[in-house]
Image (tube, rainbow, N blue to C red):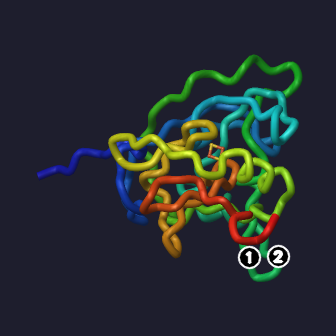
């Protein structure tokens, strides 16, 4: 019997590499390349913490091809960093606004989707602002309280879910945003 393709935001637990999922994709230009890019989370702006006023989407790098991942990733201090987590997809000057997402069946090329910039001051300010807040729970798991990104398929590492959009760290058991300053005397 043929397996129905799952919508990615309804999956609870890490995605399976090699399996196809229905993924929201948005046609736009990213690093000079125009195509339908896989995205995660809603269209939003981030003026408050990141001083980024353009409406944008974040790429879901689990669905980038291995070639694209290699092209836009690098290692620093043994940690993999990716332009796909650092640079969002937005309309460039002269382009129309980004269209609504179109769902496509795409192959999952990796199950990990973390965030490697949690040491950045803007990310730490975001963490402090949301510390202690409880996440809503959707059909598949936690929803990030910052921009409502679905976190059900984001792997839990040492009991923590790290939102792949802007790095908010959440206790997977309690569903509360971690207070990283607690106990530090700050
Ligand atoms: S949506 Fe911004 S940290 Fe989760």
Q: For residue 12, what is the image quadrant? A: bottom left
Nearer-the-camera pick, 97 or 54: 54
- Which of the numbered marks, if any, corresponds to residue 79? 1
Task: Work out whether residue 167 can be spotted.
Answer: yes
Q: Is residue 25 above or below residue 144?
A: above
Callout 1 touching callout 2 (CB < 8 Å): yes
- Mark 1: few/some/many CA within 10 Å (<14, 14-19, 20+): few
Residue at x-position 52% and y-position 61%: 171
Quadrant location of residue 91?
A: top right
For the residue pair 112 and 36, the one nearer the viewer reads as 112
* Residue that appears at 81% across and 81% down: 77
Q: Taking 3 as reference, is 184 left or right?
A: right
Looking at this view, name the residue that lies furthest to the front: 185
Drawn side of residue 25 relative to residue 122, left or right? left
On the image, the x and y values in percent for residue 43 come to 64, 29
The residue at the point 61 percent across, 36 percent down is: 147
Label 1: state its secondary structure: strand
Q: Residues within 10 Å of mark 2 (few under 14, many from 20)?
A: few
- Quadrant showing the C terminus: bottom right
- Residue ID at (45%, 41%): 136
Question: From what the image shows, is residue 165 above or below residue 148?
Answer: below
* Cα distance in 3D space between marks 1 and 2: 5 Å
**Ligand 1 shows up in which quadrant of the image?**
top right
Q: What residue did someone put label 2 on? A: 76
Can you tell which mark lies on residue 145? none
Tell me the element at label 2. Answer: strand
């Amino acid at each position: 019997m043929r397996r129905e393709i799952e919508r990615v935001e309804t999956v609870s637990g890490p995605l399976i590499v090699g399996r196809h999922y229905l993924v929201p994709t948005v046609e736009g230009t990213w690093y000079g390349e125009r195509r339908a890019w896989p995205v995660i989370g809603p269209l939003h702006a981030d003026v408050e913490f990141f001083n980024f006023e353009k409406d944008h989407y974040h790429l879901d790098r689990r669905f980038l091809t291995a070639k694209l991942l290699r092209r836009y990733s690098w290692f620093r201090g043994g940690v993999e960093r990716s332009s796909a987590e650092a640079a969002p997809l937005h309309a460039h000057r002269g382009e129309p606004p980004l269209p609504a997402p179109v769902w496509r069946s795409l192959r999952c090329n990796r199950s990990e989707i973390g965030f490697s910039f949690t040491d950045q001051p803007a990310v730490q300010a975001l963490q402090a602002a949301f510390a202690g807040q409880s996440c809503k729970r959707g059909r598949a798991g936690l929803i990030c309280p910052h921009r409502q990104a679905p976190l059900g398929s984001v792997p839990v590492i040492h009991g923590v879910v790290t939102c792949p959009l802007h790095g908010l760290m959440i206790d997977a058991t309690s569903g509360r945003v971690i207070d990283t300053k607690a106990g530090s005397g700050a």
